[in-house]
Amino acid sequence: MSNQRVTRPRIDRSVTLHCVGDWGQANFHRILSWLSQEFCDRAGPKSRTAIWSLRDGGLDSVLQVFNGEADLGISTPATLLKASLLGEEIFQKTGPMPSLRALAVLPQRDRLMFAAASGLNISSFADIRDRKLPLRIAVSEDDGTNFIGYISARVLEAHGLDEETMHSWGGSWVKACRPEQVIDLFQTGQADAVIQEAIMTPWWRDLIESRALLPVEMEDAALAKLLGRDGFQRSSVKADFWSNLTHDIQCVDFSDFVVIVRDDMPHDIAHLLTWCLVETRDVLEAQYRHIPPDQSPLSYPLQPAKMAQSTIPLHPAAEQFYRREGYLQDSDTPF
């Protein structure tokens, strides 16, 4: 891959790209910094990029790309993004966004899980309901923009722990935006339980392995209520993911980063971006190799055939690249 990075491909004209990352200190900004440098190395001499930070819980990136305010963004989880095409789930307020396209899917094995303070002796959601525990549940806000908050709210509702019910028991939903802010609500004594993603982070590991928090398995009946909806695929945290986790814990999948553009992005720009994503992936992987693959916020090694498997249609230039390089076969339907 190193020789290819020097010799091909190129765009002779200078290009300015506006990208939307995360809030500033998470993985999207890191990914876009890598991609920006690799792209500009192969574009005209005055090429440059700008990486904007999110102004909300995730919808901002998708909307800016769809509205043409930004050229490229990243969105997670991949399964929820599918709902944007028809304007379903959290995208009902925006309406359908059929022009969204993907350049690649970057693997990230993540889960949304629920855990409660160990001193409460909660072993199941039934314990909470039967005892009508006045829990203060730390949760990302369900404000119409926050993907974590939207999925968390539906999961809590499916388990009978909606906000109104918790208030009736003397409890509450204690809200913040970002994952680390939600975790901090528990760490600072403002909450007794947490529902959140980013399970590979040190915050989760420290709280689980110190037994400050105990994972609570999501119920089959509750997840069955969400069956078939985009963004609510059941999954599990596997035994030994944390040193004291002795069995699998059922939860909701929150995986994968989708690099998104619009269908009218010029073909040569979309092609070069896709080429950089695939052929210079070792540069990005190197930034995560000090972390074990199953604990990394970017799962590696990146496999091009899997990068082509998107939950929304690929940009035509991206699909052409994957097929030409043999990462998609004639019989493959990437979406």
Image: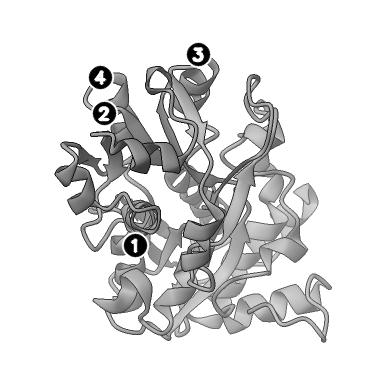
Q: Earlier in the sequence, mark 4 or mark 1?
A: 1
Distance from the alpha carbon under mark 1 to that under mark 2: 29 Å
**Relative image position of residue 124 (x, y in whole percent):** 48, 38
- Would you call the spot at circle 3 few (<14 residues within 10 Å), some (14-19), or many (20 or more)? few
Q: Secondary structure at mark 3?
A: loop
Q: Is residue 145 above or below residue 215?
A: below
Quarter of the image where the C terminus is located: bottom right
Which of discs 4 and 1 lies nearer the camera? The answer is 4
Q: Which residue is mark 4?
A: 188
Q: Residue at x 38, y 65 (%)?
A: 16
Give yes or no for contact between labels 2 and 3 (Cβ–Cβ under 8 Å). no
Residue type, label 2 = Ala
Q: Are marks 1 and 3 in contact (CB under 8 Å)?
A: no
Q: Amino acid at mark 1?
A: Ser
Residue nearest the observer in this picture, 149 or 331: 149
First-in-chain label (2 vs 3) = 2
Residue 318: name its quadrant.
bottom right
Q: Which residue is mark 2?
A: 191
Residue 11 seen by the camera: no
Number of other residues with Cα within 10 Å of mark 4, as a class: few under 14, some 14 to 19, many 20 or more: few
Q: Assign a secondary structure to mark 4.
A: loop
The residue beneath circle 1 is 61
Q: CA distance from mark 4 to mark 2?
A: 8 Å
Q: Residues within 10 Å of mark 2 (few under 14, many from 20)?
A: many
- Which element type, helix, strand or loop, lies under badge 1? helix
Q: Which residue is mark 3?
A: 210
Which numbered disc flags the more N-terminal residue, 1 or 3? 1
Label of residue 195 in the image: none
Between marks 3 and 4, how big is the CA–CA gap? 16 Å
Q: Secondary structure at mark 2?
A: loop
